[in-house]
Image (spheres, rainbow, N blue to C red):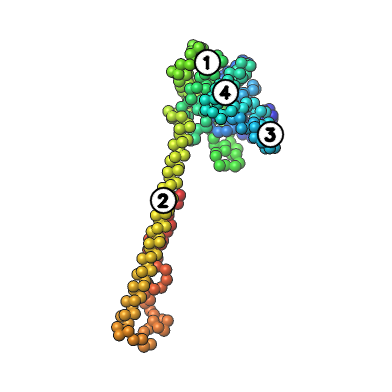
Amino acid sequence: MKQSLGRSLRLAFRPWVEGIENIPQDGPAILASNHLSFSDSFFLPSMLDRKVTFIAKAEYFTSPGVKGKLTAAFFKGVGQVPVDRSGARGAGEAAIKAGIDVLARGELFGIYPEGTRSPDGRLYRGKPGGLARVALGSGAPVIPVAMIDTEKIQPPGQVMPKLMRPGIRIGKPLDFSRYHGMEHDRFILRSITDEVMYEIMKLSGQEYVDIYATAAKRQIAEAKKAADAAARQAEAAAARGTGAGSSADSSAGAGSSGADSSAADPSGAAPSAEAAPGATGSDPDPDPGTTGSGSASDPGRSGGGPSS
């Protein structure tokens, strides 16, 4: 399946690759990449002769029904292994163990140090627990990788992918054997992760943001929620203003009509046809307060709330 998928991706999108000579012909290595799109895990392996194993959430392998079985077969076919993410710490430990097992077999292991896809195309701070501990636990070299423009192929919400050429830049291997046995030192873990992220930044040309991508996603979601709430409040205020404008128009119309009647005949007697041109249906200057549903210049009636 990997071969057929890789062939299809190469024919349809024609990805370009720089630095492929930095991938070893054999032996274990960690491919540490930025993460722009769900397709990153497909484009990178499709351009390499060797198998690359990524981890994927266990739900992809355990969903019921025909669709679930097809999904599980697909992810197994492209070389992804399931990890139960039901517990945060348990998920991290399972991912680390899975990575070390893959490397112990002399294979390539792919990992995204950011921990999730970038919400806006920028490069975010790497999480120190996974990448660094796998590197120290396995002794394998870390090869920085930059995916280029994969997020533009199928942005969130777009059904059909855009046919364009994404790119892959592969850096030189990084050796962290000098930190062997120090996998429980959080300062060492942070130092390793930051060094790898710096190399990825140089390869990708992305703007670096010194917060975690998960935190950035929460901030974006909260900002959107606040903007939506403000828009709803503005719409409600505009609706109340419209209602107040209608009431004012009705009151003005009633008062004006009463004044016209008194002015026509102070005695209260019915006016004659000659004294009341409006009675014939040909009033040349009708009272605007009695002609309909309010003045056209009334701002309370002229529009709704702002667009959300």
Q: How many marks?
A: 4
Of 2 and 270, which appears nearest the observer?
A: 270
Name above or below for residue 253 compared with residue 261: above
What's the mark number on residue 136?
Answer: 1
**Foreground label between 1 and 2:** 2
Mark 3 and mark 4: Cα distance apart in space: 23 Å
Identify the residue under disc 4: 94
Q: Residue at x 39, y 54 (%)?
A: 237
Q: Residues within 10 Å of mark 3 (few under 14, many from 20)?
A: some
Check disc 2 and report the residue beneath it: 233
Density class for disc 4 (Cα within 10 Å; few <14, some 14-19, many ≥20) is some
Q: Which mark is residue 69?
A: 3
Please say whether residue 87 is visible from this viewpoint: yes
- Determine the CA span between mark 2 and mark 3: 46 Å
Q: Residue 23, can we see it?
A: no
> Looking at the image, do the residues carrying marks 1 and 3 touch, with CB atoms under 8 Å apart?
no
Q: Which image quarter is the N terminus in? A: top right
Q: Earlier in the sequence, mark 3 or mark 4?
A: 3
